[in-house]
Image (tube, rainbow, N blue to C red):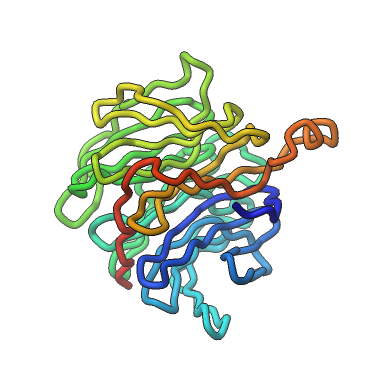
Amino acid sequence: VDARPCELGEGPLWHPLRHELFWFDILNRTLHSKARSWTFPDYVSAAGWISRDELLIASETGLFRLNLTTGDRETVASAGTPETRSNDGRADRQGGFWFGTMGKKAEKGAGAIWRWHRGELRPVFKGISIPNSICFTPDGKAAHFSDTVLGRVMKVALDAQGWPVGEPETWLDLARAGLNPDGAVIDAEGRFWNAQWGAGRVACYAPDGVFLSSLETPGAPQSSCPAFGGPGLTTLFVTTALEHMDAEARAKHPASGQLFAFPGAGKGLPEPQVIL
């Protein structure tokens, strides 16, 4: 549904007040919408909405707020190191915002998963190589995340304020099937939709982790992140990537890096507002 090729598409967000989709090309430091694009001096990867005209954006230096009308940005918090950049991220049901950091060359264990909540930024899980699959159950009582290189999707309980309680447990082991969990979103029925890097698909799992079905991204094997949007939140948007593909692979997979849409895939939940 959008032919602008992203070197590393990520972070689709349907803004519930603007009825507009935003998504990122991390390696080209760009935020896209259907109407326009914004390019930044640093890597950007994920966002939550603060108001109709402001987004909270995860970047290689931390979090900043972006005014979509003026283009002005304001630093909210610093995170990571000069050797890391941000990756997957999503707002939680309590008004917080989670995002991952990782080494710019995907160095083992160089990253972490962070949470911003009402003025506090805290690393909640450390030693992560490629943080992904950040999403939340409809009741807000649990979070999912993954380290893509390990091939396991984790689940952890959350307290009333949305902070993790206890140790994460393996909820879905994809390593046995050779699948690489990337971005994920949970729909109104509690189903877990997971983009699987290299498999060219988004797979849907029941709340208990049982595989239900999948949607293919033809011509784009590197599916990276899904989000529900559109009228009634019934369209699943999926970003893809060109990263690591040589000229031969790009010719073989001509839709790589483009944005896909699957109308009627399911019914999503509105993305929560981030409370600063």
Q: Nearer the viewer, residue 62 or 24?
A: 24
Left or right: 57 as drawn, with respect to 276:
right
Above or below for 8 versus 154: below
Out of 155 and 222, give the one closest to the viewer: 222
Residue at the spot 67% in from the left edge and 46% down from the top edge: 257
Front residue of this view, candidates 255 and 274 = 255
Residue 176 percent coordinates (x, y): 46, 14
Picture coordinates of residue 7, whole percent (x, y): 70, 48
Instruction: Check the image and name the residue furthest to the bottom.
Output: 70
- Across and down, in percent, residue 3 comes to 68, 53
* Residue depicted at x 47% and y 42%: 183
Q: In the shown orientation, is residue 2 left or right of residue 89?
A: right
Up-down: is 51 above or below 113? Answer: below
Spot the residue most to the top: 176
Query: Residue 244 appears at what percent x and percent y?
Result: 73, 37
Q: Nearer the viewer, residue 137 or 268?
A: 268
Residue sitting at 40 percent across and 40 percent down?
265
- Please say whether residue 122 is visible from this viewpoint: no
Viewer can see residue 214: yes
Using the rendered view, name the quadrant where residue 142 is placed: top left
